Amino acid sequence: MSYRKACLILLVVISSTAALAQVSHSEQVQIAPPLVRAIDPPAPDATPADLEQQGDRLRSGKLYLDALDYYHAALAKKPGDASLFNKIGITELLMQRYKEARKTFERALKADHAYADAYNNLGVVFYEDKKYGAAIKQYQKAIAQDSSSASFFSNLGAAYFSKREFESAVAAYQHALDLNPEVFEQTSRGGVQAQLPSPEDRARYNYTVAKLYAKMGLSDRSLEYLRKAREEGYKDLNNVYKDAEFTQLRKDPRFTELMATKTPVISD
C-alpha cells in the first residue's frame, strides 16, 4: 500500500470518528443539578413548635427541601402528628412528588380520621393525576367533616367540570361562592387550576363563572369572566341575552360595550 493511500484511509477513519463523536455528543442527556438545601439543619434542642414554624416559613419561601427537614425533625419529636403529616404532604405536592404526597396524606388520615384538610389535599393528588372520580370522593369526605370551606366546594366543582358533569359543577361552584365570593380569585393566584384541556371547555367554564357572579350581583367579576369566555370563542355566548342570571348585567353600559367590541381572531 502506498504512503499516499494509507494517509487517505487514515483521514477517512479520523473524519468518521469525529462525526460519530459529534452525533453522540449532540444526543447526550444532561441531568439537571439536584435540589440543594440552603440553610443550616434543624437544631437538636429546638422544640417541635419552633421546628414546625420554621418549616412553614421555609415552605412559604419555596425552600421545600429545607422545609421537609424541619417538618420531619418536628415529627420525630411528635410522632404520629396529623398536622405535620399534612404539611409534609403539601410540601411534597408542591414539589410534584405525587406518590409521596398521597402516602403522606393517607398517614395523616390514619392519625386523624376526621381531618378535613387531609381529605381535601388527598383529593388534589388524585385531581392532579386526572383521577377525577377518586378526587370527588375525597372532596366529599372533606365536606362531610367541614361544610364551611369554600375551597372544598371549589375543588369539587373543578373535578366535576373536568368530568364534564356541568350541572354538578355549577352547584358546587355556587356553594363555594356563597361561602366566599373571593374563592376563584384566591385559587387563580396560587391554587390548583381547573384542568380544562380544550378551548371549548375553558370558554364554557368562564361563561359559567360569569353567570354565577352575575346572579350574585357582582358585575365587575361577571364582566371579567364574560370577556374571557368571549375571547375564547364560547359558541353559546348569545345565551347571555336570555339567561335570567344576566338580567341586571344587561342594563350595565359596560356589558353593551363588551358585547359590541369586535373579538380579535387568533390564527394558528
Image (cartoon, rainbow, N blue to C red):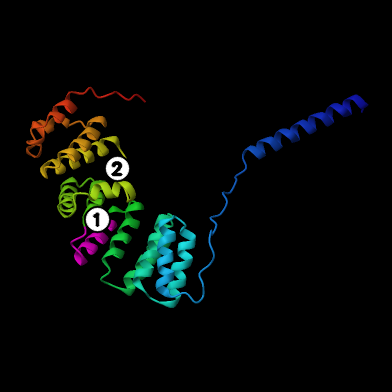
Would you say residue 141 sits in the magenta stretch?
A: yes
- 27 sits left or right of 234 in the view: right
* Magenta region: 133-149
**Is residue 194 visible to us here?**
no
Reading the chain from its start, which is encountered first: label 2 or label 1? 1
Categorize mark 2 by other alpha carbons within 10 Å: few (<14), some (14-19), many (20+): some
Q: CA distance from mark 2 to mark 1?
A: 18 Å
Rendered position, 254 above or below 51:
above
State the SS at label 1.
helix
Q: Main secondary structure of the magenta part?
A: helix
Rendering coords of residue 87 (x, y %): 38, 64
**53 over 180 or under it: above or below:** below
Callouts 2 and 1 close, C-beta under 8 Å: no
Q: Quadrant of the C terminus?
A: top left
Which residue position is annotated with label 1? Answer: 151
Image vertical order of residue 28 relative to residue 234, above or below: below
Image point 46% across, 58% down: which residue? 64
Residue 226 quadrant: top left
Q: Tag 1: residue type?
A: Ser
Residue 152 locus on image (x, y percent): 24, 57
Residue at the extreme right of the image, as rendered = 2
**What SS does tag 2 mark?**
loop
Viewer-nearest residue: 258 or 44: 44
Report the front residue among 259 and 126: 259
In the figure, 38 relative to 111: above or below?
Answer: above
Residue 196, disc = 2
Q: Which mark is residue 92?
A: none
